[in-house]
Image (cartoon, grey):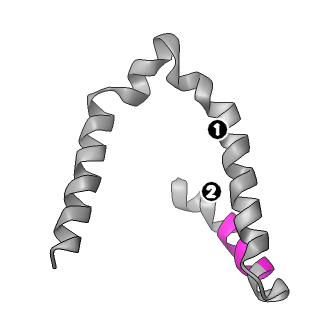
Amino acid sequence: MFVMSILPVALLYFRWRMVSGSIWPIVIAHGAWNVVTQAAFDGFTRGVSRTRYTGSRSRLAISRVIASATCRSSM
């Protein structure tokens, strides 16, 4: 699902990069997208809904990312 939702945006960003010859339009677009999504989804991580996104599964995912980054940096 994630790949299907992000692929059109990635293609759009690629097109902008090739047409403009600069990475800055994509940097600005990505930053703007982050502002929009954070404004929309920050409410889900407060109050009663907080446990769904900051519970044990999130801790497990974060520990996997840290472990993966540690293993790769030692190679």
Residue 50 placement, left or right of 69: right
Task: Name the front one of labels 2 and 1.
Answer: 1
| Residue at 62 percent of width and 32 percent of height | 41
The three-letter amino acid code for the residue at tag 2 is Ser
Residue 39 position in % (x across, y down): 69, 33
Residue 9 position in % (x across, y down): 70, 65
In the picture of the structure, the residue carrying the numbered disc 1 is 38
- Element at label 2: helix
User: How many C-alpha atoms fall within 10 Å of the one at disc 2: few (<14), some, or many (≥20)?
Assistant: few
Query: In which quadrant of the rendered view does residue 52 lie?
Result: top left
Mark 2–mark 1 Cα distance, whole angstroms, equals: 17 Å
| Residue at 76 percent of width and 61 percent of height | 29
In the picture of the structure, the residue carrying the numbered disc 2 is 5
User: How many C-alpha atoms fall within 10 Å of the one at disc 1: few (<14), some, or many (≥20)?
Assistant: few
- Element at label 1: helix
Q: Is residue 38 above or below residue 31?
A: above
The three-letter amino acid code for the residue at tag 1 is Gln
